[in-house]
Amino acid sequence: TRRAALSTVTGPGRTACGHRVALLANIGAAGDATGDAEGVGLFRTELMFLDRATAPSFDEQVSGYGEVFAAWPDMPVVVRTLDAGADKPLPFLTQPGEPNPALGVRGLRTARRAPQLLTDQLHAVAAAAHTASARVKVMAPMVSTVAEAVEFAEAARAAGVTEVGVMVEVPAAALQAARLLEVVDFLSIGTNDLSQYTFAADRMAGELADLLDPWQPALLELIAMCARAGTAAGKPVGVCGEAAADPRLAPVLVGLGVTSLSMSAAALAPVRAALAGHTLARCRELAEAALHGAPPP
Ligand code: PEP
Ligand code: MG
């Protein structure tokens, strides 16, 4: 039964035929549930910056990141640099009154206005990583162009972080996936925002839930483009949005070529069980069907 499968499937993520898919956790703080994740695919760093009048100091950041890294010994931890703006305003960084905040200066774009904040964060991450056994990587939110990725990667590497990626949350980034992978080490697809921007549908608008459904073939086509680019480049392409937590969709994402799935800890067990129930060949069939609009099985 499904319940038996849930409790008996343990260990790293793999399909029925043994194809490995890293199952990672989305976290916002050191104390967040870990489940039996193989690492962190998305560490949202906003928490440290929220509800304050000024940015946290360099030392405060080093100790905050260090706490998180210590909770994940010898495991990969992907740190997402500050994703402010839109639904996450910060008094010292974002400007109130933008007519379209979701289309405004948010995510990596805030570094245009306050480059030092990003530089400090990258240096703090590198300093904390220096004394940790976790395999620390960084990625930027809301990247839309290769030029932005180049600039971010240069800043991250200059700070001393060796593995650098970007999130794919804007269709422009998905369309440029192959070129992005020429300048960064990995891609992580944020399906929450990628849905919002692909369908021009506010991610909080419950009334538009059908447009924001991660089974939408247009969204899956963009994910497929990224995954194909990853396969061609021999570089990892993961999904860290809510879509990764849907046990019926997980085999589809793997069939599209995604190499890791990152989700809240509670979703790990059902996703692990779902993958264990499908061969990679079957995942590819399910992916092909979903790209053609087949409803969830
Ligand atoms: C996403 O957009 O899918 C994502 C993972 O980032 P956030 O939900 O924090 O915007
Ligand atoms: Mg996002």
Image (cartoon, helix red, strand yellow):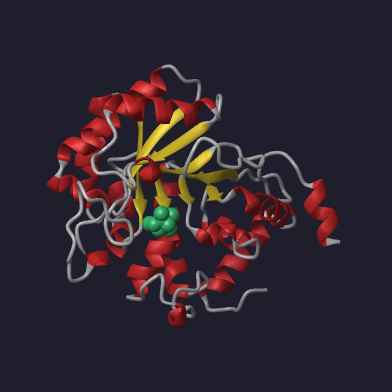
Quadrant where ligand 1 appears: bottom left
Q: Residue most toward the left?
A: 113
Q: Position of residue 270 (x, y in %)?
A: 70, 55
Pick the front one: 212 or 283: 212
- Residue at x 40%, y 38% (from the top left corner): 79
Question: How many numbered discs?
Answer: 0
Question: Is 133 above or below relative to 32?
Answer: above
- Residue at x 33%, y 47% (from the top left corner): 51
Question: Is 246 above or below relative to 27?
Answer: below
Residue 228 in view in this figure: no
Judged left or right of residue 296, residue 260 is left
Q: Position of residue 218 (x, y in %)?
A: 42, 73
Pick the front one: 157 or 55: 55
Question: Is 22 above or below relative to 136?
Answer: below
- Residue at x 65%, y 42% (from the top left corner): 35
Question: Is 211 above or below relative to 61?
Answer: below
- Quadrant where the image shows the N terminus: bottom right
Q: Position of residue 137 (x, y in %)?
A: 40, 33
